Image (cartoon, helix red, strand yellow):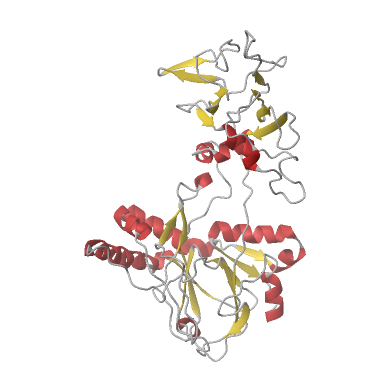
Amino acid sequence: MIPFSRRFSRAHDALPLAFSHINATMSKRYSLLSKNSTNSIKESLETGTEWSPAHKIYRVDSTQRQALPFRSSFRHNENGLGVYGPWGISLQLGANSKYPTRLPNLWLRDNCHCEKCIDPDTMQKAFDTFSLPEDIVPNEVWTEKEGLRIIYTQGPDDGNPHESFYPWSWILKNIPNGLEQEQKLEPNPNSLILWDSNIENDLPSASYEEIMKSDLGVREWTNKIRKYGFCFVENCPTSPEKTKELIERIAFIRQTHYGGFYDFTSDLSMKDTAYTNLALQPHTDTTYFTDTAGLQMLHLLSHEYGDGGISFLIDGFNAARRLKQENPAHYEILSSKLIHAHTFGNEGITIKPAKMFPVFNLLNSDFANGEPDLYQIRWNNYDRGVVPLENEDHERVNMWYAAARRFNQILNLDAMRYKTKLKPGRPLSKNLSSESFALSLF
């Protein structure tokens, strides 16, 4: 019998950032003075320091020029480019940037993370964004080694001047392509690792004892699941109770129409091919959910008086990459053609997602830190519904079948599959978004 858990957890990774080109140790300060002042901008320079690259270089008429430390024109630098004003704040982020990056004023003010703006207990926004003036403009702006500092005329509540600070790491994380540019400078140790059948020589695994003992053990375990898409746990007690405790070291167990945590065998107690002794083709589970299950654990408690029981793990992301390299048109159609999915084998149960999804689900932009822009695979021929026709254009439907056929062939290549036999005391945890799973005859 196999205790089987479908579960989902939400978490935000804290990705370490390194910014080698923002390394100056001084600040450059601009102030908005009274309208009658002859000098609308002043600067405050710290002794023995240099100006941060955030304002160091500008390009004017395709000519690179050094920004000078002072100009009397209203909120402009020596080259005539606006430093800040109603349009926002202009920053030259990195020597390789072709144009300055403009940060909108209201966007910056809305994202202040000081203790007045973010409740330190709840970490929720503590002010009404829409009480701010729509045309808000900073009163003072200056760059520092660690980030951008701004003073606004009024705070959210008391009407007094309000000071905000934005670390360079936060700015670069939130501008278009910011992290992608930084990734070229510093490789990310948390990038996904794509693998094939050779993974058997270096299998990701974690210690049951370490996981149960400390959060550091949990971190090692979940980090390997993230990197590889799966991870074995060594020396787990062969009981449902201990297996459930192990799962809950990550988070709660998600309830589905199968239940939460449960034992099952091949008795067709649920009308699903997984409850038979038939061989399963490579697939990802719960494609019929709008929000698919995230992690799944399988723990074989016993396997007596039977043959087979061989399992195959396939790196779906690696298979998708191979398909893209072979035939970009195949990759494109599986990334764009929306497909129905459903489950209704059990009496009184009919489940469909709120909308159709493609096989390959992509982010709007590249994954940060060098990871591929593919973030989820929905591949399950058992639960797939109709491939929709498109205004009598059958060619795209034929293209989809051709691409799906080739992807299925790649998934079933021996060179792509890790072959194993689950055994008691060694549960398998896997990411349902990236791993295709197949099970041979019992």
Residue 123, given in percent of the width and then of the height, sits at: 71, 49
When the figure is inspected, residue 84 is found, relative to residue 223, above or below; the finding is above
The percent position of residue 283, horizontal first and vertical second, equals 44, 71
Seen in the image, is 409 located left or right of residue 441?
Answer: left
Residue at image position (65%, 14%) is 42
Residue 80 % position (x, y): 50, 15
Q: Nearer the viewer, residue 299 or 15?
A: 15
Closer to us: 206 or 296 = 296
Q: Is residue 42 left or right of residue 67?
A: right
Q: Which image quarter is the N terminus in?
A: bottom right
Q: Is residue 183 above or below residue 305?
A: above
Rendering quarter of residue 151: top right
Asked if residue 230 shows in the view, the reply is: yes
Question: Which of the two residues, 35 or 253, is positioned nearer the viewer here?
Answer: 35
Residue located 43% across and 65% down the image:
355
Q: Position of residue 173 (x, y in %)?
A: 57, 40
